[in-house]
Image (cartoon, rainbow, N blue to C red):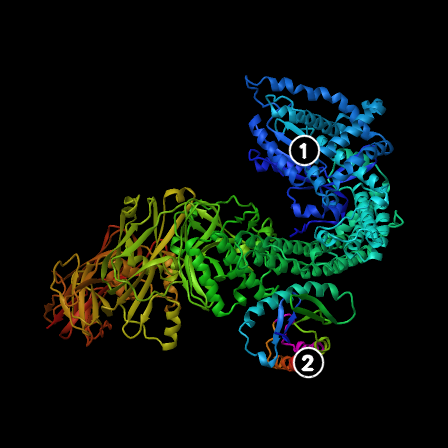
Amino acid sequence: MSFVDYSQTAEDHQSLLVLVRHTGSHLPTNLFNLVWERIRALSVVHVQGQNRNVVVRYKRGYPVENNEWGAFQAHRKVLGLVSIGKCVDHEEFADLFENYKKVKEEYSNTIINSRLIIFGMNTDGSPLDPKPQQPPPSSASSPPSQHSPSHVSADSGHGASAETSCGDIDSESTRGGPDGDGNSREKNNESVEGDKTDSNPGPSRTGSDGGGSVTITRVGGDASSVSQNGGSGVGSGKKASSSEEKDVGGRPKSNSLTKESTGSEVVFYPSLEQCADLEERLKEFVTSLFFVLEGKRLERTFERSDRLMLLCAPFEKKDFIGVDTDTKSFKRKCMGRLRKHLGDLCLQASLPGEAILHYQTALDLLRTVNDFLWMGACYEGLCSASVVLTMSQSKATPPLRRNQSFSEKRGVSSPNTKHKANAAAHLRQQQSIGSYSNGVDHLEQQTSLHCLNPEDIIEKYKEAITNYSKYKNSAMVEMEASLKACRVLIQQRKYLQASDFLQNVVYINLSSSEEDKIQRYSTLSSLYGQIGFHRKEAFFRRVAAMQCVSPGSNPAWQQCYQLLLQAVQGYNIDLDPRDSVQGLNSGWPVIQHRVLHELVYSARRMGNPQLAVRHSTLLLHTMYRHLSAEEQKEAVTGLETLTSKCQGTPQPLSTDTGLILPPVHLTTLPTVRSFKVLSPPPHLRAVKLSSLEDSTSSIFIFTPLLLGSSDKKGNATDVDFKWVAEDMCEVQLQLVNPLSVEMRMLYLGLLTEGVGVEVFPSSPCIPPKSSPLTVKLMTKPQAPGQLKVLGYTSQVFGVASHCKLKDLTWDIPPFYDIEVVPALPQVSLTCSLPKAATFASTSLPDGATVVANAAALLYAGQSQDVVVTLHNISAHPVTHLAVKLETRNEAKESTDKMFQWSEENVQSQLPLQPGAQLCVALCLYAASDFLLPPVTSPDATSSSMSSRSHTENSEKGTQTVEAVLSLEYTGGPGQEAGYCRRCSLALTVDVLPSLYITNWDALPANSGHDVSLVLDILNVSSHQADVQCDNTSCDSSPPIIIETQQCRRIVVTLPRVTFPEQQESDKFESRIPVKYRSSRLPDFHSMVLTSFVDVRWTMPAAKVKGKVSIDYLKWTEDQLDFIRRPDVTWHVVVNKQHYTAPDLMSFPSSQPVTVDVSLSAAKESYQDVTLTVQPGQEGGGGEGQQPLDPAIYICLGSQTVSTSELEAGSSLHHSCSFLFLSPGRFHFHISCAAHHPDSMVQTSWSCLPVTQFSVV
Amino acid sequence: MSGNFYFVMVGHHDNPVFEMEFYPPNKAADPKRDDHRHLNQFIAHAALDLVDEQMWSTSNMFLKVVDKFNEWFVSAFVTAGRMRFLMLHDIKNEDGIKNFFTEVYETYIKFAMNPFYEINTQIKSAAFEKKVQFFGRKYLTG
């Protein structure tokens, strides 16, 4: 059984293998790793004086079986051992030392030198805290430091020329040589025994002794120029040997094992911080290894052919037992193999040019004896040497780990190398950009004549592999060679050929453990990755992952998961769904599904449900489009099963390897079709208080330039409304379920930023393949400020996601900015009236804010009290309330009359505390003109109706009046910020006709001071109406009963009225022809009369009562004369009798009737006053005032009297007699005409009542 | 267990456009086939790397065997429009596969000229399927 080293490269052939071991349990692993890193950094050691660089390869573990291949290929030999441990006292140290020795035993066949590095002790080997009972160690440990001067001189030996040292080593290598070749010596058993006993100290002792002593004597003078460190390794080797000697010599047991071992290969450091010379010690250690090898090399070079031994690979040993060693071919074989070994040594001694020569010679020797295995090794050696040669030219310094002394020596070398370094860097850059080329040939001229060119290297590798493949047992070597060849090809950028070698690796039949297979596939995968074959890389990663959990072995789910995770990239699966472009079907869906499924499964088996959920979410999120209904169901069920144990989070997850798994937000499950930020309902909207309308915005009224707003326009995230703090705010979403599985959302809330909010999540359930489902998301901002709506959070199938708008694929602003104004109170509005069925006038300015409506049905003239109640349902008091009535402008007067309330009453109830109520008493009055509806043509009706808010039901004569009672209120923090709210009550009043005044007239009453208004009242209601007219003159007359559709006349007597002067504007208005008026206007005169006339009606059946208003009656000028109180007073006496209407005086005929008239002006004086008494006879009609036929009467005296002036307060008297010639009923029409003194306008008055009498 | 073929046409985004399996008539119902289907697809996907690399090394559309994994060989054919035809087969049948590819290519060209077909999307055409089936019988299993 051999173990394949998958990380080997061609360059490793030139390296010295050093095993670095972690000994003891006291040294923490991380500390060991730190030391390991420091050691590893020292990969190239420059050997002073030799002008050679020794490459060292450190390994933390190396199977002993592989060590046995050391004879076959020298770089497989463990040459050095460095053990690192920690201890605090001598007992522990003893344990460590034992351990160290044991390890050394294991590799004793090949080890040349070794070191034990101990932390936790003083450099002299004493414990850190000097204990009282142990003073001797410190004193005993002084010798090492005293030794140092001699070592200084010792190291100079290595600094000396190769010639001298060569000679030295040569001289002693006769002894030391066999030690190195454990294999060859194994044939004779006794030497094996001896080898074991002294193999450890052997090489070091001999090497150092020889080198050290000789140089001291010879070239001690040079010592001063060389640093102490360089040679101390050998020095310590000497120490070791000396101590060993002493030990062997039965040195009395001192108080410390430490002390004696300090002399050996043990190095002490108090701590990691205090080991500055660690590198130096290592360097010296490596140098010591080099010199031993160099010694061997030289020894072999001059080996005589009679002392040949056969080197062989581990599996060959048994083949050569009993083989005749004296044949020519055997000798040739020995020689060839030795040559080949020599080549290896040359390579390790950094003489690749020489190595090539050796290899070629060996090849020629071996070819004749058909030693294919070793021929293969020769080919490989050739390749390695060539690679080393080529690479040393082309490879730039940067990739090498920087070593102080090394870079000092090499860095300043030739500008040529620098130039090449640049070229190489450029090439690498190109590679990283991703330009594929199928190979770059290095065009540098070969320094060595025998060095292979790049193509040949590959050819030789192929041959080597072909040769190896002839042996079943050399599969390990074959595989390593393939990998090495591949790595060389990667450097040459010949990817296609590299892939051929990788392909070959797959088919090498090597029985190996499961871990080994995993490692093989992983190596293949990473190499495929290096040649840019990412799909292959992914394939082999997955194969490796499957191998981890293959049946029959102990399943390593953790490893499987990690490998699969590395594979996803190659399958075009993006762990962050935001990176992948939606809609682009990239990759192989079936494979992606499979890999994700495996990822989920392995994560679950690994015992990390969190990761399983994350991957399962990704699976559903990215793959659902490609899944069948059945598979979708399966995926959803799988996810739900996982999330039932562990909920999916929207936070990034980190795996054990430190890889961060970005969160998977289910932005497409459900798919959001629309995302609309809703304005609050009108009655809850915050409105700027009109009084606080700011004028600070700009001094310019208008500018066509969009200054400052152009950048905002780009994302259009601002909304044209505001939200109110502590108020419910809404966003409307339209969700679609693209799956064929019902989607039960446990949580759907708004994702906001900027202001603290209280979220009111909803939990909709979307049926499969649904049409868009509208969902409203509520939120309540807690404070005023700028609120940013970023998206929504959801919980679907147990996975919580934060879906941001910017991650949604369709065109939508990345966020919405909403201003939240301070909290405002909120009131609810109720009205004592029943609700209206319809409300037509929503187009009114405040129509949108209507929160309640009310309807009333009133008979014309009826009144009703309505209570409007405001209930403060918020937590803030209402401190400001303004009540306003909104109607159409044209109907203003009548509606103002119809709706009345007391402003003081309202204001007195403020402030309205939270939870309290406020009542507004509203008085409704069904105003009407009480006139018969005008008879108009149908089309005229329709046109006029449309423009009037008084819409009339032409059949019934019902009028509908609509108005909006608008309330503006504010309080709390919102008021300070200058915001208020508006709500309104829609009122609909249907006015039913009750009574109509069909005809009216004014008649002179009995007394000249009064006038009688005669009204014909028609009852158009469906009930009997009792009409009562009360006026100042007669208090309680019995009510007049008017049946339905009955017309009754009522007479209202009232004192004659002096009308106030009419306004010019009113006059003008009244002059507009009726047909152009939008509504009937109340008559000026009637409005004055109204205060004197109080006609009330009651409908006992309907239990309603009301008032008849005469505002709209029109009076003729004659009628007005009756009504108007005259400016003059009359005093008429007939035949010495005072006339009082309606008495009828009777006079005998043929007796004169004497009339005494006295006219007195009350306030003003008049000019040209003419008083006329004109008798008249009562005709058929009562009113007729035809002048009497002069033949009927004889006037005694003057019928007319004139005076030029009538002073105010004075009176005019006139007396005349009439003789009536025939009996009959007569009357006197007494009138007076006069001129107003200022305006010269003629006015006239008649005496009322007209004096009537009969003549018999 | 021989004479099985798995044919797939791969679009520009490594997405399969058309898949079909051919097997000898006597092995019509193999219960293990379902497991294999996944493996076939994985192998075909991994072979795309080699197809992409090898198509530049030759002027031929038919790339012969580009890859192999276990018992499967992968032959490839790259159209002028860089559609990649892959064939997984467990027996060597170079001529048959070449002919098959050529015929399918021709059929595909005709199909792609349909203005209602969008390149790189899955081919869902009974006629196309039938033709490919026919070529499969003619050149591969037949």
Quadrant in the picture for residue A546: bottom right
Question: Which one is in front, A1095 or A381?
Answer: A381
State yes or no: residue B104 in magenta. Answer: yes
Residue A280 can be seen in this image? yes
| Whether residue B103 is situated above or below residue A966 in the rendered picture | below
Q: Position of residue A173 (x, y in %)?
A: 80, 35
Q: Position of residue B3 (x, y in %)?
A: 64, 76
Residue A737 can be seen in this image? no
> Residue A337 vs residue B117: left or right?
right
The outermost residue toward the right is: A449
State yes or no: residue A133 in magenta. Answer: no
Quadrant in the picture for residue A814: bottom right
Image point (46%, 59%), residue name: A639
| Whether residue A141 is situated above or below residue A462 in the rendered picture | above
> Residue A219 vs residue A1036: left or right?
right
Residue tagged by mark 1? A115
Quadrant in the picture for residue A1130: bottom left
Query: Which amino acid is tagged 2?
Result: Tyr
Q: Which subunit holds the residue at mark 1? A: A
Image quadrant holding the C terminus of chain A, namely bottom left
Residue tagged by mark 2? B139
Q: Position of residue A427 (x, y in %)?
A: 78, 51
Please give the range of residues in magenta. Answer: B100-121
Q: Position of residue B38 (x, y in %)?
A: 58, 67
